[in-house]
Amino acid sequence: MESTVSVTMLDLLVKYGVVNEDDITDSAEKIVSVTLLAQLVEVLEGKLKMFSKTQTDEMSEVQKYVERVRVLSDERDKLTTQFDLENERLRNQLKDLIAKSEMEKHEMEDMCSQEGLVELVGSSFSEQMAYLLVVRATLLDNVDALHDQLDSSTKQHDQLKQQIEALTSEDSELRGRMNNAMSEMGGMASKLTDALRE
């Protein structure tokens, strides 16, 4: 068995060029040395296979990592594109808002000029609002005062109406009395006329 193994190992050594086939003899000492060398080669081959497997596994992990990096890079590029598009949309929206604000500001200034509110031209929106709120408060106060005057006028009107109605009633009563008196005087005149004729 040892001889067969040794010969097999010798064949491997010859194959890998460690020894020449001509140098191989049947001496026991050389066979033992060759056997040890063959065992060493076997161990080294095992380690080489293990190293090769480890390297393959590591390469597989590296490839997975590279693929993951590529996927993340693609996702980043997509997000960057989306962000760029969104930024462009927001920039355009901001430009539109600024243009609209400027147009409304000019319209407000024109309206203020037309209405004689020159002091508001060129003022900020908050200043214009403050001014309009003051004007509104003043108008509300004036409206309240007018309501009070109207209530007072209504009371005076009601009093005058009552006085007129009372005077009208008195006038009607006087007219009735005058008519009665005229009738009585007419009757008396008629009697006097008849008496004078007799």
Image (tube, helix red, strand yellow):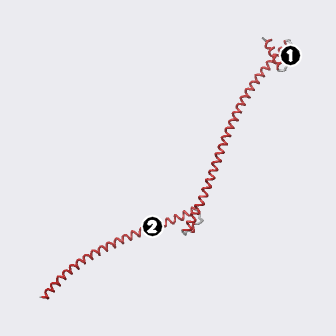
On the rendered image, what quadrant is the C terminus found in?
A: bottom left
Q: Quadrant of residue 63?
A: top right
Q: CA distance from mark 1 to mark 2?
A: 128 Å
Q: Position of residue 89 (x, y in %)?
A: 62, 50
Say which amino acid is labelled 2: Val
Between residues 54 and 184, which one lies in front from this camera angle? 184
Q: Is residue 158 left or right of residue 96?
A: left
Question: Which residue position holds label 2?
Answer: 143
Mark 1 touches mark 2? (CB < 8 Å)? no
Viewed as shown, does residue 126 lie left or right of 30?
left
Which of pointers 1 and 2 indicates the residue nearer the eye? 1
Q: Residue at x 57, y 63 (%)?
A: 107
Q: Amino acid at mark 1?
A: Glu
Residue 21: which disc?
1
Estimate the x, y position of residue 112 in percent, counting from the top left: 56, 66
The picture places residue 58, in percent across and down from the top left corner, at 72, 30
Snapshot quadrant of residue 74: top right
